[in-house]
Image: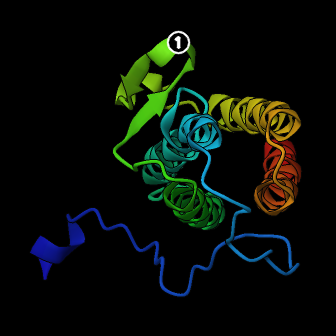
Amino acid sequence: MEENQNKLINSCSFAGVSPIMVDLPTPPIQVREKNLAYANLLSIDYCGTVSEMSAVAQYIHDENCMACERCPMARTILGIAIAEMIHLQRLSQLIVLLGGRVNFTAAYGGGRQKMWTPGYLKITEHIGKMLANGIEAERETIRQYRQHIKMINDDNVNAVLERIIKDEEYHIMLLEMLMRE
């Protein structure tokens, strides 16, 4: 009996956590035609410095740091991470349809390629800083998507990116709410 009294236990359950996304339909994952230039732009959104891959890894790290002491907040962060995983999947499907490859390498201009690295993450154990970093990253992601929308002349691809932006805006609102708590 005494042995159990000395144990530290994490009772935070992640059962039933769902993706936190805006309740709107998702446009079909389709493209007008193959276009490697567009696939390369999306590869940056997929696994560049500012990317869905970075968001997933960052939110998973942050959620892990919060789970023991701030379970409700950790559950929200995990829900955001799951939404980012869905964005990652949608981007990968578009990249393949456009004729690109999904290999965790972002294809920048001039043939320059860079493989995703956890060095892109901002590691901190301060919860306020985690939330502020999340807000900043979501805003930068939205800026990058808007820039890519201007460069992509495919309404199908742009509709998916616009839908993803709506989720990212929702994530900012939630993170700002958590900052106030």
Q: Residue at x 39, y 32 (%)?
A: 116
Up the image or down, 43 lies above or below 70; here it is above
Q: Is residue 11 left or right of residue 130?
A: left
Q: Is residue 84 above or below residue 125?
A: below
Q: Is 111 left, or right, of 33 in this rendering?
A: left
Name which residue lies at 37% across and 41% down.
Answer: 104
Horizontal and vertical percent position of residue 56: 51, 50
- The amino acid type found where label 1 is placed reads Gly
Which image quadrant: the N terminus? bottom left
Of residues 145 and 113, the one nearer the viewer is 113
Is 106 drawn above or below residue 114 in the view shown?
below
User: Residue 178: horizontal and vertical position, in percent?
Assistant: 79, 50
177 with respect to 2 (left or right): right
Above or below: residue 92 compared with residue 141: below
Identify which residue, 103 or 131, lies in the foreground: 103
The residue sitting at 57% across, 17% down in the picture is: 109
| Residue holding disc 1 | 110
Secondary structure beneath dot 1 equals helix
Residue sticking out furthest to the front = 33
Task: Rate crowding at label 1 as few (under 14), some (14 to 19) or many (20 or more) other CA atoms within 10 Å.
Answer: few
